[in-house]
Image: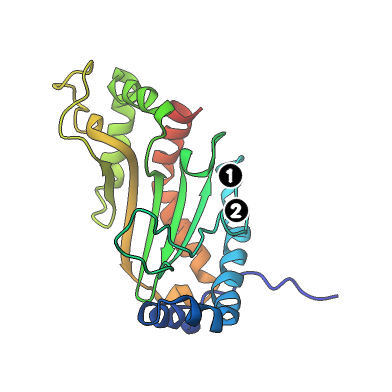
């Protein structure tokens, strides 16, 4: 009977693959190195998704963690249809675990990005789908729910490692009070917190699960607020 392999960390070969891809971003090079991609990027990414999903379940019972491309693991292929940059591949790994009834990115969730030298770990909702724009604005404008999210954001961002993202508009939308205590949040079309930094040593071992989960837990109150007040 074989032991379950489990997530043992990413490796120097993972980061080297992205460094080399950045320097050789062509279909020919990628196909010649597909085996390296599958073994050193996809396999540990799949293991990470499966194990992180299990760790998040006690906190987020309906967390979706599907270790497949176009599910919890983003495609490495870039969408170049409307871009001047026609390089075919992303030079980073993207992973997303979400909780909610809509398609993937229409829900709040937890994101991990890894490239040759940096990581980004985030939680929240990157861009509100159209059907959630009004529920979001109503929630942040509400005296009780708006006060709650403001306290959550203030508490988490006391740690200067965490940054708030999602601000988009220049003016408070029509129909909402520009003098609202949460007027700044009414300028958002997404609401998320993120940490960005150099690749830590934990990336190279199973300790990275605890490392990433620690960030996810720090951001968890925002995820829960969005899930319970906007997303359902």
Relative to the observer, which residue lies in front, 25 or 86? 86
- Name the mark on residue 53: 2
In the image, residue 6 sits, relative to residue 150, either above or below, namely below
Residue at horizontal 43%, vertical 61%? 78
Q: Are marks 1 and 2 in contact (CB under 8 Å)?
A: yes
Number of numbered discs visible in the structure rendering = 2
Residue 7 sits in which quadrant?
Answer: bottom right
- Residue 97 in percent (x, y) is at 53, 50
Q: On the picture, is 39 further left or further right than 87?
A: right
SS for callout 1? loop
Q: On the picture, is 92 further left or further right than 172?
A: right
Residue at horizontal 47%, vertical 30%? 231
- Residue 232 in percent (x, y) is at 51, 27
- Residue 48 in percent (x, y) is at 57, 64
Q: On the picture, is 4 further left or further right than 199?
A: right
SS for callout 2? helix
């Amino acid at each position: 009977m074989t032991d379950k392999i489990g997530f043992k960390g990413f490796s120097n070969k993972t980061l080297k693959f992205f460094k080399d891809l950045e320097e050789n971003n062509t279909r020919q090079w990628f196909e010649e190195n597909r085996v390296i991609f599958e073994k050193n990027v996809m396999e540990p990414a799949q293991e990470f998704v499966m194990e992180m999903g299990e760790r998040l379940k006690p906190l987020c019972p309906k967390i979706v963690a599907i270790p497949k491309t176009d599910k919890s693991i983003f495609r490495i292929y870039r969408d170049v249809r409307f871009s001047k940059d026609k390089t075919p591949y992303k030079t980073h790994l993207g992973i997303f675990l979400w909780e909610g009834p809509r398609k993937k990115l229409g829900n709040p969730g937890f994101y991990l990005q890894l490239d040759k030298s940096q990581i980004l770990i985030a939680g929240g909702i990157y861009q509100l789908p159209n059907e959630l724009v009004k529920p979001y604005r109503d929630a942040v404008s509400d005296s009780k729910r708006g006060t709650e999210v403001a306290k959550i954001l203030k508490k988490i961002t006391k740690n200067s490692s965490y940054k708030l993202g999602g601000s988009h508009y220049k003016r408070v939308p029509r129909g909402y009070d520009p003098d609202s205590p949460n007027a700044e949040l009414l300028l958002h079309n997404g609401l998320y917190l993120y940490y960005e930094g150099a690749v830590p040593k934990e990336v190279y071992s199973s300790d990275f699960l605890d490392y990433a989960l620690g960030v996810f837990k720090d951001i968890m109150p925002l995820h829960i607020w969005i899930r319970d007040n906007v997303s359902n």
